[in-house]
Image (spheres, rainbow, N blue to C red):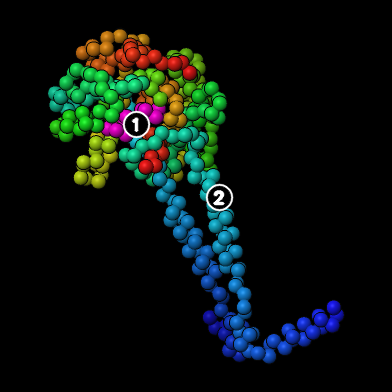
């Protein structure tokens, strides 16, 4: 063993005498590759949670939608917490002044279905104040006065109609943008 | 800059190796280019418009009304008479009507309470598919406006005349199931 290692050392020492071997290292330099991969990883880690805007719900598919850029307007989602959950709920998400996303569960949608009741008033008030707050702190001018509404494709129309009416009456919104997903042919 | 020590050529290079920096910056640039304009796919719904407003804006033409029922569509081509059609027939029936219209190409829609949201969006998508003939790219998909028909508050419990000529009831969708008698809806 000792003899073999001594022999090996001797061979290594002999190598620098050849200038061609010294000039070119016979390894791939992985440092830039690792740099790039790490940066990619960090960027994706940071961006992925930012991309999901609002509570995720399965959206209906369309072929003739408009592709609009995200103005970071508040997002209302209507859907179920999980597929087994019988209760249809409403979420509101918006960007705070630090650019972080805030997501609230406003409550079950049936509260909006009985206009004039205390439940309706509570929910409508909360929704209105929060949306107005998001519009106020929005850095993007295009976000003000805009909303993005995402509704689970299985939810019946009667659960969405009260919200649309409320937005029209309380926030005098006349154009509402409804979120859809691209239909895959 | 002036730091060159003038050492033996080939021993130690005294410049910063910018290649990894450029690599990283380029990758960053590409990623931001790809992700920054996060696209939101939207269909815009005008909510809600009163039929009276429509008549003020446009001429004396009657509004086009589409009422989506659980299995069919009640369609009024602006004549005041509505008839029940299949959802697949809608584009062929609606297209000539829309092409004839000058000015306000607004289509009013209303839905049966039990219609799932996917059918709501599908109806809007069907109407929008007709805007494709528009040459103006700006008008594409937006050329035809889709507006939700406003229901009257006291109308919610159903005046119950499916063929009523009253505008508020032209769709006949107020009263649950009355306008679609052959379909029984299961309560979830």
Q: Quadrant of residue B107?
A: top left
Tell me where residue B88 appears, x and y as whole percent: 28, 29
| B130 vs A48: above or below | above
SS category of the residue bearing label 2 = helix
Residue range in magenta is B117-127
Going 45% across and 51% down the picture, which residue do you hit?
Answer: B35
Tell me where residue B21 appears, x and y as whole percent: 53, 68
Q: Main secondary structure of the magenta part?
A: helix
Q: Are marks 2 and 1 in contact (CB under 8 Å)?
A: no
Name the residue carrying label 2: A46
Is A159 placed left or right of B10 in the picture?
left
| A75 vs B4: above or below | above
Is A63 placed left or right of B137 in the picture?
right
Going 60% across and 82% down the picture, which residue do you hit?
Answer: A24
- Label 1 chain ID: B
Is B87 placed left or right of A15 in the picture?
left
Is A76 placed left or right of B85 in the picture?
right
Which image quadrant: the C terminus of chain A? top left
Name the residue carrying label 1: B122
Between A124 and B97, the one nearer to me in the picture: B97
- Label 2 chain ID: A
* Residue B123 highlighted magenta (yes or no): yes
Going 54% across and 54% down the picture, which residue do you hit?
Answer: A43
Going 57% across and 68% down the picture, which residue do you hit?
Answer: A32
Q: Quadrant of residue B114?
A: top left
Tell me the distance, in whole angstroms, between the alpha carbons under discs 2 and 1. Answer: 35 Å
Tell me where residue B97 appears, x and y as whole percent: 17, 29
**Residue A146's mark?**
none
Name of the residue lying farthest toward the right: A2
């Amino acid at each position: 063993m000792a003899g073999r290692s001594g022999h090996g050392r001797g061979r290594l020492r002999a190598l620098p005498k050849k200038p061609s071997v010294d000039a070119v290292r016979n390894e791939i330099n992985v440092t830039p590759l690792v740099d790039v991969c790490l940066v990619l990883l960090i960027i994706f880690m940071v961006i992925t949670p930012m991309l999901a805007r609002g509570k995720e719900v399965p959206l209906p598919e369309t072929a003739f939608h408009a592709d609009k850029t995200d103005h970071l307007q508040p997002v209302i989602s209507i859907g179920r917490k999980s597929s087994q959950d019988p209760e249809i709920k409403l979420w509101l998400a918006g960007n705070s002044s630090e650019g972080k996303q805030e997501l609230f569960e406003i409550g079950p949608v049936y509260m909006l279905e009985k206009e004039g009741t205390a439940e309706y008033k509570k929910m409508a008030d909360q929704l209105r104040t929060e949306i107005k707050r998001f519009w106020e702190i929005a850095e993007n001018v295009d976000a003000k006065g805009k909303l993005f509404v995402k509704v689970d494709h299985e939810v019946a129309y009667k659960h969405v109609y009260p919200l649309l009416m409320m937005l029209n009456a309380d926030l005098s919104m006349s154009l509402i943008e409804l979120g859809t997903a691209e239909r895959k042919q | 800059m002036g730091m060159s020590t003038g050492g033996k050529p080939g021993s130690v290079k005294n410049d910063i190796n910018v290649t990894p920096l450029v690599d990283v910056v380029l990758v960053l640039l590409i990623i931001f280019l790809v992700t920054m304009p996060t696209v939101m796919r939207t269909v815009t719904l005008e909510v809600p418009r009163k039929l009276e407003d429509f008549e003020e804006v446009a001429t004396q033409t009657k509004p086009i009304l589409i009422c989506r029922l659980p299995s069919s569509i009640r369609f009024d081509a602006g004549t005041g008479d509505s008839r029940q059609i299949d959802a697949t027939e809608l584009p062929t029936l609606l297209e000539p009507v829309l092409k004839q219209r000058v000015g306000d190409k607004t289509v009013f829609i209303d839905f049966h309470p039990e219609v799932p949201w996917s059918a709501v969006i599908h109806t809007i998508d069907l109407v929008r598919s007709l805007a494709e003939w528009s040459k103006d790219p700006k008008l594409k998909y937006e050329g035809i406006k889709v507006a939700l028909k406003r229901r009257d508050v006291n109308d919610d419990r159903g005046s119950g005349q499916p063929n009523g000529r009253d505008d508020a009831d032209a769709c006949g969708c107020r009263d649950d199931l009355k306008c679609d008698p052959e379909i029984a809806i299961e309560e979830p």
